[in-house]
Image (tube, rainbow, N blue to C red):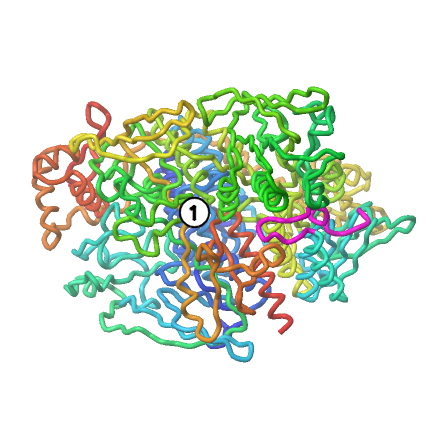
């Protein structure tokens, strides 16, 4: 049992303290068994608080710490590192979540949120008092990377990983490299040709002797874990088993395939998708010819298969607006006397791509805005399309357009085989059905499976430049992980008590990661946990009939003590507004401060007033009074005295 | 720290989110990195923000651990309040001349206790809070600053010595001088970020003239946990606003700015889209619906560009919460009368094709992104080229997005063009990958 516990309860700058009475909890926790220090902090994660905790650990010889702040998903590593720097074992620290689980979830009931936080923090203290010293597992790692998918993202990442001295296996399902880009024709924003871009990249791959490219290769099975994955690949009739340290998934996307009849698609050869249209533009010389007929006018219908507020693709595919406009510019440049109608919802030519939109407008392209609830209707007479659309840019006037061609600007969708890839690699799928990263800002290319990274459009719509950036980001992370040849793994894994284990095999049956097998021990078989493969999910522990397998950090002692902590009765008194950190200033005199401060203070002497009332009283601009009053408030000379009767202004008073 | 303080593998210029990410990525690969920041703390623009779209994580929760990791990484040296004077390339090595501006507070002694700040009688504009409130002439740059040490604003200091007397560890030193140093590095990463459009340069919107016209960065401060007013109130008179307007594309997608009064190169025509303003405005609108449940919020827009992962869904969510979206460009903003401080917005409602006027009690200008390209001037014997919009030019935008016109110099984040935070982070990771590949093959 720990006897020198430090407890830190975070305000999260108001995110927690606006609802949970953290000051009172801080005082209550100081009385708990084993607690030596209990503090309230503004931002536990800030550098200065981290330093303060380190100092406390060192000076007071704390044997464990509890941080009550946000979700452990955010900051477990932050505070483990604090412990490490102060010489405390990082597993003698427990995170308690009083933000997502208390203040945010129960913002309507601050008292109840405080009571719940009380239980959770007590549970955390009880748990940490049973915490053990754990050491992370060091394993050796192969400096070898498998990249799944040889589109531009995968190819480009292969080049850098190879240049950073990793062996790379580039695994492509199709028989050629370059994915969609190889067939895309002219690309925005550089006007390079897709095939040429892919050729250029392919030459760079060929220059790297440490890249092995497999085409017509399918991913069959993945086993192992970070540092040592086994990737089974089928090459025709041949089967390969590759030992790699890390995996980068760059399997890309499919274009949305419109349903039969969607804007007349497949009912007439004059309704085609943008990728097909681009091929046609690329292959036509002098005149734009489609199935033997000359094309003089084109209507582009945007957001096909995307931004469906009720359909399955609610997201925006981000690159299609620019792609369509770029095609239209190409057509204008290449063929004479072309008319272009753009039927759009919002034009999303973000960033510098806006210039393409402006050029298209200058070229005389006609932009017609529709809304989702009133989409354009394509009617076909003898296969010739007529479009009826209400233009929201001209007071919803109904327009009828006869065009030679209707181009459906189709969005991006997850690949049809993405489920098979995700299930082999256990990558989570998001609501949009693309692969999901852990966090868009904190871990944008990492997945929940350590050592498996995602890049490019398999994680959501991206243009070429963005796909390359995310794949290279993944390359940087992979190189950092594999560079030393060693990887440290979490010690929070299952462990077996050899005495009580009777090897019934139930734990191995439920283990999703194939981490448990049997081993001979003292004349009997017992279960053995593969430390590198075990993910610490804990599913084995409750299945064991003889209670012989447990999860580190989640032992019976720890769990039961947490329940005790949660069940204990809270004696919380109603909140008393605290003075926080402005106390010391209240007694300062105003000598030396700006003259207007003294004037404001005089006006407030014995009064509570709103800013306009003060301004009127001292005959100054209200904006000037606001600036100074707020500064006086900041330094503790005045404070808010609640709302006025109309509830539209705060009133202020002098601080005692 | 076991770093040779004169020789590095990489110099990272700018300690915003992109610079931190690039420095951390390289340092994790065991390269020695010098991160140079011109301000008093790392954190860049992101540390100013309240919450971030589309997850509504609090910005501090995402960025302070990264700041802390950057400041502590054994392979990263940090220089703050530092300017780069010259970068010269010779035989593949970059020689850098730097000057560290004095803080007048000894960094190694200061504990960040703020006793000096409490006693200082001189009030100056608080830049961190976009001048909506005052702070002392000696202060810590902001609550979550890293490093958390005080600095004196010598332009305003009256040398009354109150701080010197109050400071227990005797960290105050009025005689500090700029310190010039030089270092060598194999590669340079430019992550100098962007400038926000100065809304004064769109005089028809009344910014600077009407106190209740603010810019979006000011609004982000008003709703941040470390906010200046403890509540969302108007800077004009402290009123709790109940009819708030957002004017999108202020200083973006706009070619009519060039004749603005006092306009410098800063505010010349900005034809491009800034890529972030639609989303940050929608974010603020959602947060305001939470902070001021009774307020009406209207967003005047040209196109809503909710293009990233989860962004369209976030936009639809705002509509569902009751935020009004009106397609129309605001022509002019005038103050109704001095007393009420309310504002009249004149606009063309595109849906009905009519000119309309609307009254709001607080107007937020969603200002755009302009290049910050000062760094290009310090290269002495090489030319760092800029693109047509004066961002750092990407010479192979599709396949090597971080390459610049100088071999060994890479660009990360918004220095190359407008980007949101996730894209800036990815671009920084990508720059780190390209820089590491480059160093490994010199």
Q: Nearer the viewer, residue A526 or A188?
A: A188
Chain letter of disc 1 in the image: B
Q: Quadrant of residue A627?
A: top left
- In the image as oriented, which residue stretches furthest toward the bottom? B91
Query: Is A214 placed above or below A609 here?
Result: below
Question: Where residue B279 appears, x then y in whole percent?
Answer: 46, 39
Query: Is A212 placed above or below B422 here?
Result: below
Question: Where residue B123 appears, x then y in whole percent?
Answer: 19, 53
Residue B79 painted magenta: no
Q: What secondary structure do most residues of the magenta stretch adopt?
A: loop
Q: Which residue is mark 1?
A: B271
Question: Where residue A117 appears, x then y in whole percent?
Answer: 44, 35
Q: Nearer the viewer, residue B79 or B400?
A: B400
Residue B364 seen in render: yes
Q: Give left or right: position of A370 versus A584.
A: right
Q: Residue at x 38, y 29 (%)?
A: B289
Q: Residue at x 62, y 30 (%)?
A: A304
Q: Please, what secondary structure does the residue beneath circle 1 have?
A: loop
Q: Quadrant of residue A376?
A: top right
Mark 1 crowdedness (10 Å alpha carbons): few <14, some 14-19, many ≥20: some
In the rendered structure, which segment of residues is drawn in magenta? A174-194
Q: Nearer the viewer, residue A259 or A52?
A: A259
């Amino acid at each position: 049992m720990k006897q020198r516990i430090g407890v830190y309860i975070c305000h999260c700058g108001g995110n927690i303290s606006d609802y949970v009475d953290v000051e009172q909890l801080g005082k209550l926790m100081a009385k708990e068994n084993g607690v030596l220090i209990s503090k309230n902090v503004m931002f536990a994660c800030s550098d200065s608080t981290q330093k303060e905790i380190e100092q406390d650990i060192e000076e007071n010889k704390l044997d464990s710490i509890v941080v009550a702040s946000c979700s452990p998903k955010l900051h477990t590593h932050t505070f483990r590192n604090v412990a490490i720097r102060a010489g405390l074992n990082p597993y003698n620290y427990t995170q308690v979540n009083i933000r997502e689980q208390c203040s945010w979830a129960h913002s309507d009931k601050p008292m109840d949120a405080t009571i719940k936080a009380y239980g959770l923090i007590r549970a955390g203290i009880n748990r940490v008092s049973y915490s053990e010293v754990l050491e992370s597992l060091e394993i050796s790692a192969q400096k070898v990377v498998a990249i799944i998918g040889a589109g531009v993202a995968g190819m480009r990442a292969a080049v850098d990983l190879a240049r950073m001295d990793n062996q790379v296996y580039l695994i492509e399902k199709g028989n050629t490299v370059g994915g969609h880009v190889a067939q895309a024709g002219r690309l925005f924003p550089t006007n390079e040709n897709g095939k040429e871009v892919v050729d250029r990249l392919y030459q760079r791959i060929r220059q790297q002797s440490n890249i092995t490219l497999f085409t017509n290769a399918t991913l069959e099975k993945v086993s192992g874990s970070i540092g040592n994955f086994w990737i089974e690949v089928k090459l025709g009739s041949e089967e390969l088993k590759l030992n790699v340290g890390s995996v980068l998934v760059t399997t890309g996307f499919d274009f949305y395939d419109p349903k039969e009849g969607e804007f007349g698609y497949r009912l007439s050869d004059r309704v085609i998708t943008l990728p097909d249209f681009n091929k046609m533009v690329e292959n036509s010389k002098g005149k734009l010819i489609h199935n033997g007929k000359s094309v003089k006018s084109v209507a582009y219908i945007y957001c096909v298969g995307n931004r469906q507020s009720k359909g399955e693709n609610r997201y925006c595919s981000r690159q299609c607006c620019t792609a369509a406009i770029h095609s239209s510019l190409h057509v204008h440049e290449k063929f004479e006397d072309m008319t272009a109608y753009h039927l759009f919802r919002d034009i999303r030519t973000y960033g510098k791509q806006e210039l393409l939109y402006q050029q298209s407008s200058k070229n005389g392209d006609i932009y017609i805005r529709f809304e989702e609830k009133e989409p354009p209707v394509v009617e076909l007479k003898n296969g010739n399309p007529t479009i009826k659309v209400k233009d929201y840019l001209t007071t919803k006037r109904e327009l009828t357009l006869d065009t030679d061609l209707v181009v459906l600007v189709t969005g991006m969708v997850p690949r049809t085989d993405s489920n098979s890839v995700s299930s082999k690699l256990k990558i989570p799928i998001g609501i949009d059905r693309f692969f999901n990263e852990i966090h868009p800002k904190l871990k944008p290319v990492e997945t929940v499976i350590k050592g498996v990274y995602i890049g490019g459009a398999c994680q959501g719509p991206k243009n070429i430049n963005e796909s390359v950036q995310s794949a290279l980001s993944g390359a940087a992370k992979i190189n950092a992980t594999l560079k030393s040849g060693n990887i440290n793994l979490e010690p929070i894994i299952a462990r077996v008590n050899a005495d009580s284990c009777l090897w019934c095999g139930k734990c191995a049956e439920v283990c999703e990661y194939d981490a448990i097998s049997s081993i001979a021990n003292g004349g009997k078989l017992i279960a053995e946990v593969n430390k590198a493969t075990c993910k610490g999910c804990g599913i084995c522990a409750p299945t064991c009939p003889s209670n012989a397998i447990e999860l580190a950090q989640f032992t019976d002692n720890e769990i039961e003590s947490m329940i005790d902590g949660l069940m204990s009765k809270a004696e919380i008194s109603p909140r008393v507004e605290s003075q926080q950190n402005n106390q010391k200033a209240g007694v300062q005199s105003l000598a030396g401060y700006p003259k207007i401060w003294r004037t404001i203070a005089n006006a407030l002497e014995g009064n509570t007033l709103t800013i306009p009332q003060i301004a009127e009283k001292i005959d100054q601009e209200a904006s000037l009074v606001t600036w100074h009053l707020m500064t006086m408030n900041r330094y503790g000379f005045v404070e808010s005295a609640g709302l006025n009767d109309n509830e539209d202004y705060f009133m202020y008073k002098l601080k005692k | 720290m076991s770093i040779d303080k004169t020789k590095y593998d990489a110099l990272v210029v700018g300690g915003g989110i992109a610079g931190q990410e690039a420095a951390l990525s390289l340092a994790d690969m065991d390269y020695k990195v010098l991160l140079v920041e011109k301000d008093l703390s790392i954190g860049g623009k992101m540390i100013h923000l309240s919450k971030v779209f589309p997850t509504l994580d609090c910005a501090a929760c995402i960025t302070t651990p990264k700041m802390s990791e950057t400041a502590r990484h054994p392979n990263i040296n940090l220089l703050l309040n530092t300017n780069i004077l010259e970068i010269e390339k010779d035989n593949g090595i970059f020689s850098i001349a730097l000057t560290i501006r004095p803080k007048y507070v000894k960094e190694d002694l200061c504990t960040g206790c703020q006793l000096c700040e409490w006693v200082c009688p001189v009030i100056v504009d608080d830049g961190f809070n976009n001048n909506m409130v005052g702070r002392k002439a000696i202060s810590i740059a902001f609550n979550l600053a890293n490093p958390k040490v005080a600095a004196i604003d010598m332009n305003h200091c009256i040398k009354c010595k109150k701080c010197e007397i109050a400071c227990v560890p005797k960290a105050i030193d009025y005689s500090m001088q700029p310190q010039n140093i030089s270092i060598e590095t194999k590669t340079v990463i430019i992550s100098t970020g962007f400038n926000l459009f100065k809304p004064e340069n769109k005089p028809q919107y009344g910014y600077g003239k009407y106190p209740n016209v603010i810019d979006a960065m000011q609004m982000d401060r008003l709703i941040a946990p470390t906010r200046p007013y403890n509540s969302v109130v108007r800077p004009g008179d402290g009123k709790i606003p109940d009819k708030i307007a957002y004017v999108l594309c202020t200083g973006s997608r706009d070619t009519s700015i060039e004749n603005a009064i006092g306009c410098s190169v800063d505010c010349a025509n900005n034809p491009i889209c800034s890529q972030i303003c639609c989303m940050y405005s929608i974010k603020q609108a959602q947060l305001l619906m939470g902070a001021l449940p009774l307020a009406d919020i209207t967003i005047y827009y040209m196109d809503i560009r909710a293009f990233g992962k989860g962004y369209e869904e976030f936009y639809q969510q705002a509509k569902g919460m009751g935020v009004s979206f009106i397609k129309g460009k605001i022509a002019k903003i005038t103050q109704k009368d001095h007393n009420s401080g309310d504002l009249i917005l004149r606009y063309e409602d595109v849906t009905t094709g009519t000119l309309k006027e609307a009254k709001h009690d607080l107007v937020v200008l969603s200002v755009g992104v302009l290049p910050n390209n000062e760094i290009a001037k310090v290269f002495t014997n090489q030319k760092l080229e800029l693109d047509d919009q004066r961002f750092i030019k990407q010479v192979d935008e599709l396949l090597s997005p971080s390459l610049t016109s100088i071999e060994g110099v890479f660009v990360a984040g918004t220095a190359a063009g407008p980007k949101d935070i996730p894209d800036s982070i990815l671009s920084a990771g990508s720059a780190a990958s390209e820089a590491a590949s480059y160093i490994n093959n010199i």
